[in-house]
Amino acid sequence: MIPAKTLVSTIPASPHPLVDALALPKTKNGRLVVDASLRVQGYTNVWALGDCAAVPTSDGTTCPPTAQHATRQARLIAENIGATLAGKTLRPFDFKGLGKMGSLGRRNAVAEIFGLSISGFLAWFLWRTIYLAKLPGWGRRLKVASSWALDLVLAPELVELRLDRSAGAVHEHFESGQNVFVEGELGDRVYILLSGRAEVVRRRPGAGGVAVEQVFATLGPGECFGEMALLGSAPRNATVRCVEPMTVLSIPKREFGLLAANVPGLRASFEQVMARRGLLPQS
Ligand SMILES: Cc1cc2nc3c(=O)[nH]c(=O)nc-3n(C[C@H](O)[C@H](O)[C@H](O)COP(=O)(O)OP(=O)(O)OC[C@H]3O[C@@H](n4cnc5c(N)ncnc54)[C@H](O)[C@@H]3O)c2cc1C
C-alpha cells in the first residue's frame, strides 16, 4: 500500500478579472457582448475577442472559448479596425471550428474533425500530429517528433529525476482531517498558516504498548510549522493535521534555508517558537 492523495484539477475558462471591472455590456457569465464584427455592443471604438468576448455565430450560438477561434478573431479584428479607419465595410466573424480532440492516454484519443468522429489509435496519432505541427520552428518539431517516435518502441521511463528545483512558495489547501505531514517523514517544506486551524499531534506509547495520539498544540492564522525538520535536518517529530479547512503558504526547504541563512534573526525567531512548543530545550 502506498498512501497517496488524489488531486482532481478542473480548469474553467473564464474572463480575466480586469474584464469584470470594465463598465461594458456583458453576458451573465461575464463575457463582453460584441457584434459579429467583434465590436463591443454600443461602441464604435471598443473591440473584444477570445475568451473575454461572447462572439455570436451565424447559427445563433456563441463561439466556444478556444484558441482556434481566438487566433482567427485576432486576424479579423485587425482587418476590421483597418476597414473602420479606411471607411470600408466590416466583415463578420464566420468560423465554425475545425473540431475537437482529447487524449485519453495509452495511445488512445477521441476526436471530432469536420463532423467525423474518430477514436482509438488513429485519433491519438492525429492528435499528436496536429500538436506537433503547431510547435514553433522545425528544429523543435524534429526534436519532439524523434522523441515521440522512440517512445513508440522503447519502454517508458520508470523513474524521473526531478533535477529542477521547486517553483518557490505556493499556496496549499487542506480539508479537515487531512495530514499536512506525518511524524517520521522527512521534512522538505515549511508552512505558514494563512487561514483555518491545525493541530500538532504526537504518537506516544499508551496502556498495553498501544500507541496513542496526543495533541499538544493548536495552530491558527499567522503561525508557522514544519521548520524543525529543516533547521535540524531531522525527520518530522510530530504530525500536523488540519482541523478546520485551511490555506497555508508552503515554502520549499532550499528557499527557506536561504532565508534562514541570510535574514538576520529569522532562524533565532523560529528556534524561539520551537522552544515555546517544547520542540527544543529552552535556552
Ligand atoms: C488547460 C487548457 C487547455 C486548453 N486546450 C485548448 C485546445 O486544445 N485547443 C484550443 O483551441 N483551445 C484550448 N484552450 C483554450 C485556449 O487556451 C483559449 O481559448 C485561448 O488561449 C484564448 O485566447 P485569448 O487571447 O482570449 O486569452 P489568453 O490566451 O489567455 O491570453 C491573454 C493574455 O493576456 C495576458 N494578460 C492578462 N492580464 C494582463 C494584464 N493585466 N496586462 C497585460 N497582459 C495581461 C495573459 O498573460 C495572456 O497572455 C485551453 C485552455 C486551457 C485552460
Image: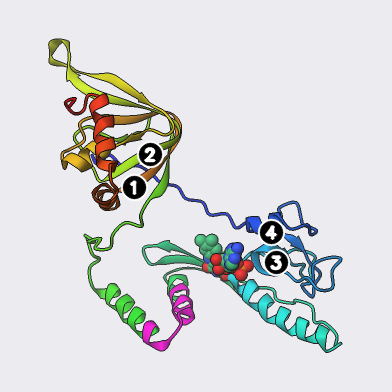
Using the numbered discs, state the Cα–Cα distance from disc 2 to disc 3 in whole angstroms.
43 Å
Q: Which one is earlier in the sequence, the residue at label 1 or at label 4?
A: 4
Q: Is residue 130 magenta?
A: yes
Using the numbered discs, state the Cα–Cα distance from disc 3 to disc 4 in whole angstroms.
18 Å
Whether residue 37 sits left or right of residue 145 in the image: it is: right
Q: Which one is earlier in the sequence, the residue at label 2 or at label 1?
A: 2
The relative height of residue 78 versus residue 229 in the rendered view (above or below) is: below
Using the numbered discs, state the Cα–Cα distance from disc 1 to disc 4 in whole angstroms.
32 Å
Between 53 and 42, the one lying in front of the other is 42
User: Mark 3 highlights which residue?
Assistant: 63
Could you tell me which residue is drawn at 71 percent across and 53 percent down? 29
Residue reaching furthest top? 207
The relative height of residue 152 versus residue 205 in the rendered view (above or below) is: below
Q: Residues within 10 Å of mark 2 (few under 14, many from 20)?
A: many
Tag 3: amino acid: Cys
Q: Residues within 10 Å of mark 1 (few under 14, many from 20)?
A: many
User: Mark 4 highlights which residue?
Assistant: 19
User: Mark 1 highlights which residue?
Assistant: 251
Using the numbered discs, state the Cα–Cα distance from disc 2 to disc 1 in whole angstroms.
8 Å
Q: Is residue 100 visible?
A: no
Q: Nearer the viewer, mark 1 or mark 4?
A: 1
Tag 4: amino acid: Val
Provide the secondary structure element on which disc 4 rests: helix
Magenta part of the chain? 127-140
Q: Which one is earlier in the sequence, the residue at label 2 or at label 4?
A: 4
Using the numbered discs, state the Cα–Cα distance from disc 2 to disc 4 in whole angstroms.
32 Å
